[in-house]
Image: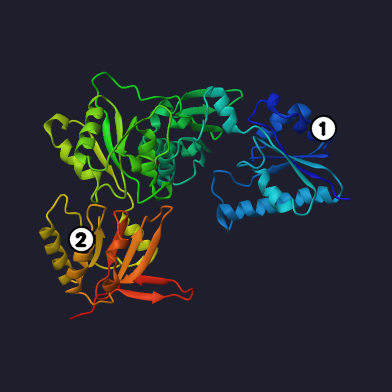
């Protein structure tokens, strides 16, 4: 009969953190296998050394390459693939001979561990058991003495080998994080922390629970002193409270676009800015899209007090608060960015930093649902006459329609504005054919999403409200019925020559 394969998690380094089950498996194994670099020293073996007997058969699995270059025709990956195939064949020979094989793994065998490469090649052929171990993530948190994540916070675990842009985006978007595999990646990880605005809260843990353990603030760590067995930690923000700033210092205002609906439409940068804010200011409906975080103040208001809301945010920033003004869609499209920047032009707020973070617009979201109606030139017009007279709106509709532009119509109607859609339809029919396609998109991304394609002549004003955006095609816009019966709308990128 074949022997049994064990993947044995040894924990983060301190032999006393090995589980009872791990010690039992090592004691009962015939073969002890462990990975090492070409120098022959194995951290995994050193952790389990007191449990390895003279009668154990030892199988060192020596990597052909670690950080150096290789002349293998398949490059680094080719060299490693050949190594894993050869190593698993050696272990298979022991298993076929009826021997029990324990493959030692630092931390947990299936968490960024070398054992998994043996597991994937052998577990479908042999009886296999994986013994979990304490991870370096858990060890780092324990040594720092700080919670990693609390309540509904999200913990993200990242390899430092990711591209810097990807690291930055993920660090900005998450509540808490651990970055593994530092060593040579440390300068890149540090830059990503800084670009994400998280450097000051980041902690550094080196060789947790091992000899030579070191704990420090990440910002003060020298890059040339960082070994592979170290991690960067962004701990829980739950009890952090507002950032402590020098008396008299000024905070900032960040105008954040949340997109047309919920979290799926948020960019990582916007998600990070919302999480980092001391105060959230916005229309209550939009604030409800943002997760509640301990210690963060929320200031909701009605949808028709943009100027007052902007002034309030700027006054908070003057008191040293970091403020996120929450706006639906893109804050620069009929939304809060203009109101904040207009208020910030007052000399009183000249020293308050103001940033605008983009979001997915209602028009872009609706267009994506319908196909590609905005594939060529288009104009965006608000039908609301609350801030500009209808005569101006009508003039712009005629001009855009006369130029044969696709039209994205915002704020088409409300309980108090019921006639504008009908009037806009009449104006457009002076320049467009009755069968011009119109995308009627309501609550895109929300629970009540409904996207329909109708003829311009059949556009029904009673079915349009403030949660609706209209996309009116040009003379070139096409409607095509696909094989599944669904209709898609698209506007060709090439316009016919006169």
Q: Is residue 470 visible?
A: yes
SS at circle 2 = helix
Q: Residue at x 66, y 49 (%)?
A: 117
Q: Is residue 340 left or right of residue 139?
A: left
Q: Nearer the viewer, residue 91 or 199?
A: 199
SS at circle 1 = helix
| Residue at image mark 2 | 420
Q: Residue at x 34, y 67 (%)?
A: 372
* Residues under numbered marks 2 and 1 in contact, where contact means CB atoms less than 8 Å apart: no
Give the x, y percent position of residue 367. Answer: 34, 63
Q: In this picture, is 396 found above or below 95? A: below
Q: Residue at x 26, y 43 (%)?
A: 303
Give the x, y percent position of residue 27. Answer: 82, 32
Q: In this picture, is 392 found above or below 53? A: below
Q: Nearer the viewer, residue 366 or 66?
A: 366
Q: CA distance from mark 2 to mark 1?
A: 82 Å
Which image quadrant for residue 398?
Answer: bottom left
| Residue at image mark 1 | 27
Q: Tell me how the rendering is colored.
A: rainbow
């Amino acid at each position: 009969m074949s022997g049994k394969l064990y993947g044995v998690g040894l924990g983060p380094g301190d032999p006393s953190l090995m589980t009872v089950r791990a010690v039992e498996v090592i004691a009962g194994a015939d073969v002890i296998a462990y990975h090492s670099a070409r120098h022959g020293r194995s951290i995994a073996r050193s952790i389990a050394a007191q449990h390895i007997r003279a009668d154990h058969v030892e199988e060192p699995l020596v990597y052909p390459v670690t950080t150096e270059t290789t002349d293998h025709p398949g490059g680094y990956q080719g060299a490693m693939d050949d190594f894993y195939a050869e190593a698993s064949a050696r272990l298979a020979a022991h298993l076929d001979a009826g021997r029990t094989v324990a493959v030692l793994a630092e931390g947990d065998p299936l968490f960024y561990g070398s054992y998994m490469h043996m597991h994937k090649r052998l577990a479908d052929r042999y009886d296999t058991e994986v013994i979990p171990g304490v991870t370096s993530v858990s060890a780092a948190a324990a040594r720092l003495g700080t919670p990693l994540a609390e309540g509904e916070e999200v913990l993200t675990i990242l390899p430092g080998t990711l591209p810097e842009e990807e690291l930055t985006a993920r660090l900005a978007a998450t509540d808490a994080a651990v970055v593994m595999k530092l060593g040579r990646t440390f300068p890149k990880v540090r830059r990503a922390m800084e670009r994400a605005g998280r450097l000051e809260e980041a902690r550094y843990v080196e060789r947790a629970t091992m000899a030579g353990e070191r704990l420090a603030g990440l910002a003060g760590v020298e890059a040339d002193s960082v070994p592979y067995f170290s991690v960067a930690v962004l701990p829980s923000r739950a009890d952090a409270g507002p950032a402590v700033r020098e008396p008299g210092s000024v905070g900032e205002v960040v105008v954040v676009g949340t997109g047309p609906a919920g979290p799926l439409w948020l960019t990582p940068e916007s998600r990070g800015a919302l999480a980092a804010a001391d105060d959230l200011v916005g229309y209550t409906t939009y604030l409800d899209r943002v997760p509640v975080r301990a210690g963060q103040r929320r200031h909701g208001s009605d949808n028709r007090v943009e100027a007052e809301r902007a002034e309030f945010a700027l006054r908070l920033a003057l008191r040293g608060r970091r403020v996120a003004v929450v706006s639906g869609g893109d804050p620069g499209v009929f939304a809060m960015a203009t109101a904040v920047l207009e208020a910030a032009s007052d000399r009183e707020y000249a020293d308050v930093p103001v940033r605008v973070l983009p979001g997915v617009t209602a028009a872009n979201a609706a267009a994506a649902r319908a196909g590609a109606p905005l594939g060529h030139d288009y104009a965006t017009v608000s039908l609301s006459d609350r801030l500009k007279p209808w005569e101006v709106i009508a003039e712009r509709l005629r001009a855009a329609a006369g130029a044969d532009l696709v039209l994205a119509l915002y704020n088409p109607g409300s309980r108090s504005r019921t006639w504008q859609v009908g009037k806009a339809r009449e104006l457009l029919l002076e320049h467009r054919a009755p069968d011009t396609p119109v995308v009627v998109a309501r609550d895109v991304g929300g629970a009540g999403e409904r996207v329909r394609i109708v003829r311009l002549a059949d556009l029904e004003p009673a079915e349009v409200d403030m949660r609706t955006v209209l996309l009116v095609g040009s003379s070139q816009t096409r409607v095509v019925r696909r094989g599944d019966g669904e209709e898609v709308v698209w506007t060709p990128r090439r316009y016919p020559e006169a």
